[in-house]
Amino acid sequence: MELDANADVQANPSMNQAVEMNLEVKNAIEAAMNDTFNMFAATMDSGERVPKLVVAHHMVGNTYPYTVEDWKRDIQLASSHSIDGFVLNVGRDDWMTARVDDAYAAAQSVGNGFKLCLSLDMTSLPCATLQDVQTLQHWVSRYAHHPNQLIYRGKPLVSTFAGEGCTYGGSFATAWTEFKKGLGGNIHFVPSLFTNPAILNTLPFLDGIFNWNGGWPTQLNEQSSASQIEQAINSLNTDALLLSGMSDKTYIAAVSPWFFTHYGPDTWNKNWIYRGDDWLFAKRWEELIGMHDRVGIVEVISWNDYGESHYIGPIAGAQPNSQAWVDGFDHQGWLEMTSYYAQAFKTGSFPVIAEDKVFVWARPHPKDASAPDHVPRPQFADL
């Protein structure tokens, strides 16, 4: 199967954090893996089981033409490949509410226990006034009691993309504290914040952290030495920094097969790659499986982010002017790989291989090809 060599990630400084579980909890989780998988996780303090989860980031912004049937197709396909839920990225567009309503309705209709939760995209949603914060709270409360809402450690799971730029109350710490307080504290809040990891354990509103940029070697550039590249190949090396600071919190780790985006200044002005060579997807999965006891949730970036080219689901919905590097490049080979590694992560052991398969992806053109394109060559293209 041929896969596009391009892929991309939403760029921002990276963050990583995780859960260093005590022995009692570790044993409870391992025991849970031998029983029927229970999607409803309860609090660690209660001693109840907290299963390992694999979810996929789903861009609602790319679903404008979706119907309930489209959502059902995505949910059934993801579930059949060992993905437990979608993290729905939502922004400021009013029409997104209807699409998210459809997603929850579809999940309930499918009836296979597939879960959903929100990722508030704070590069789109404003967070400067009380009304802004109340809008965020409304997003959460609208779905918090839905039967297909992802409950983690006893509460609805809520995440973000960014949020360190919130200014309500004078600082992002105040803004998110008020956000959570207004919901009665009844959420399990695990955002991706692009800020100094050293301050994370001082933020009272955090129940955990999502290390968005942990899925790529974002530290590399075209000046990186051979030894630096080799070190990055062997380990992405950002998880430990976050894990060490918040040992009692939930850690969501990112895994992604690629990163490529190619927008000029006339659109989103995003034009770079992250190095995805050296079997990045497989190596990152194996790294996370080796950290099985310390990582609660793995989030695959992404199901359908065509603009950043790391989609593992089918090409469907509405593309964000990414047709030039998406059309004709099916990525569902990565979805099939996800199934294998997701099972290994959740159970702690690799599943039996019933049939040998080879997965291949490569550049569809020579490295030094010159394209008749008004957008310049992507940054880091020669890395």
Image (tube, grey):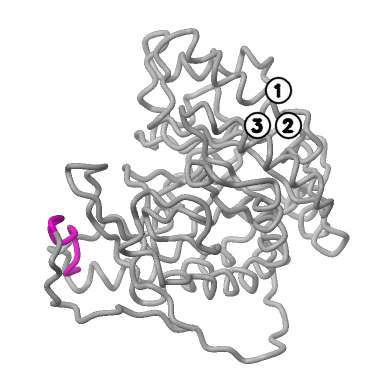
- Name the magenta segment's main secondary structure: loop
**Front in this rendered view, residue 122 or 107:** 107
Residue 327 found in image quarter: bottom left
Is 299 on the left or on the right of 170, as rendered?
A: right
**Front in this rendered view, residue 21 or 32:** 32
Pointer 1 residue: 186
Tell whether label 2 touches label 3 (CB within 8 Å): yes
If you read the primary sequence from the N terminus, does the residue marked by circle 3 or circle 2 appear first?
2
**Front in this rendered view, residue 374 or 84:** 374
The structure residue drawn at horizontal position 50% and vertical position 35%, both measured from the top left corner, is: 160
| Distance from Cα at disc 1 to Cα at disc 2 | 6 Å
Q: For the residue marked with disc 2, what is the amino acid?
A: Lys
Q: Is residue 378 magenta?
A: yes
Tell whether label 2 touches label 1 (CB within 8 Å): yes
Pointer 2 residue: 155
**Front in this rendered view, residue 190 or 99:** 99
Pointer 3 residue: 188
| Distance from Cα at disc 3 to Cα at disc 1 | 7 Å
Is 283 on the left or on the right of 98, as rendered?
A: left
